[in-house]
Image (spheres, helix red, strand yellow):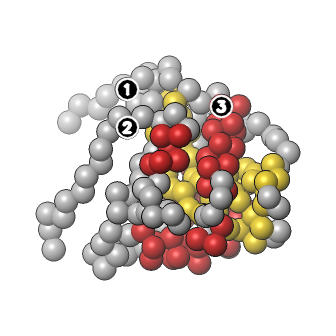
């Protein structure tokens, strides 16, 4: 099999731009800030379990099994950027962003929102909206030109409405619909 020639070398840690350092934002007593994976890694497993239990489509067929090594690699490469929401010292929400050039349009810096979650006890009012507004502000400061994200079609927020109400309010427009189908046992 013929190997394709690389047009540019893999990025080294020195070639990845550092994320802009910013002061945390305080909203209604909650702190929204960028945090590195190593700082929050021990807090994440129980939140991921709660997130998975609430949103997984087929939890028996696709059990929760985060690839922590891959997440740490992405963090070290400067690809993973995490916005956290804290109530005092307690982590109550997160948005995991994957930053980089688009594979089909390499001159366009994009961020793909990998996962996002906010503890149900904090979903009333504008907290979820503010979380995404701050995430956008952070990504814009990092040079991102386009953000992509997906939502679970079956999930409704605390008011019984689809989450996409927030995204529409923020100016997002649907571009793709993502479907899934099991073809094996």
Q: Secondary structure at mark 2?
A: loop
Quadrant (top left/top right/bottom left/bottom right) for the C terminus: bottom left
Q: Which residue is mark 3?
A: 140
Task: Decide if residue 105 is on the left or right side of residue 47.
Answer: left
Q: Residue at x 31, y 28 (%)?
A: 4
Sooner in the amino-acid sequence: mark 3 or mark 2: 3
Label 1 neighbourhood size at 10 Å, few (<14), some (14-19), many (20+)?
few
Residue 7 in view here:
yes
Q: Nearer the viewer, residue 181 or 42?
A: 181
Tag 2 and tag 1, C-beta contact below 8 Å: no
Residue 12, position in %: x, y? Answer: 62, 37
Determine which quarter of the picture holds residue 14: top right
Which label was assigned to residue 104? 1
Q: Nearer the viewer, residue 24 or 65?
A: 24
| Front of the two marks 2 and 1 | 2
Q: Are marks 3 and 1 in contact (CB under 8 Å)?
A: no
| Quarter location, residue 46 | bottom right
Please provide percent x and percent y for residue 166: 52, 47
Q: Where in the figure is residue 150, as x and y percent of width and height?
A: 41, 49
Q: Residues within 10 Å of mark 2 (few under 14, many from 20)?
A: few
In the image, residue 96 above or below residue 68: above
Which residue lies under the disc numbered 2? 174
- Mark 3, secondary structure of its residue: helix
Q: Which one is nearer the viewer's eye here, 2 or 78?
A: 78
**What kind of element bears circle 1?**
loop
Given residues 77 and 169, the one toward you in this image is 169
In the picture, the disc for residue 148 is none
Rendered residue at 81%/40% (across/down)? 21
């Amino acid at each position: 099999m013929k190997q394709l020639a690389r047009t540019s070398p893999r990025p080294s840690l020195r070639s990845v731009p550092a994320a802009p350092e910013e002061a945390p934002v305080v909203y209604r007593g909650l702190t929204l800030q960028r945090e590195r994976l190593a700082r929050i890694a021990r807090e994440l497993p129980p939140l991921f379990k709660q997130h998975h239990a609430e949103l997984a489509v087929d939890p028996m067929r696709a059990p929760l099994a985060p690839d922590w090594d891959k997440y740490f690699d992405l963090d070290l490469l400067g690809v993973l950027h995490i916005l956290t929401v804290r109530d005092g010292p307690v982590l109550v929400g997160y948005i995991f962003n994957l930053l980089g050039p688009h594979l089909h349009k390499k001159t366009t810096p994009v961020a793909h929102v990998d996962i996002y979650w906010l503890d149900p006890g904090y979903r009333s009012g504008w907290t979820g909206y503010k979380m995404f507004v701050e995430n956008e502000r952070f990504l814009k400061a990092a040079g991102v030109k386009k953000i992509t994200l997906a939502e679970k079609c079956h999930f409704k927020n605390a008011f019984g409405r689809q989450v996409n109400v927030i995204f529409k309010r923020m100016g997002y427009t649907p571009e793709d619909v993502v479907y899934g189908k099991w073809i094996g046992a």
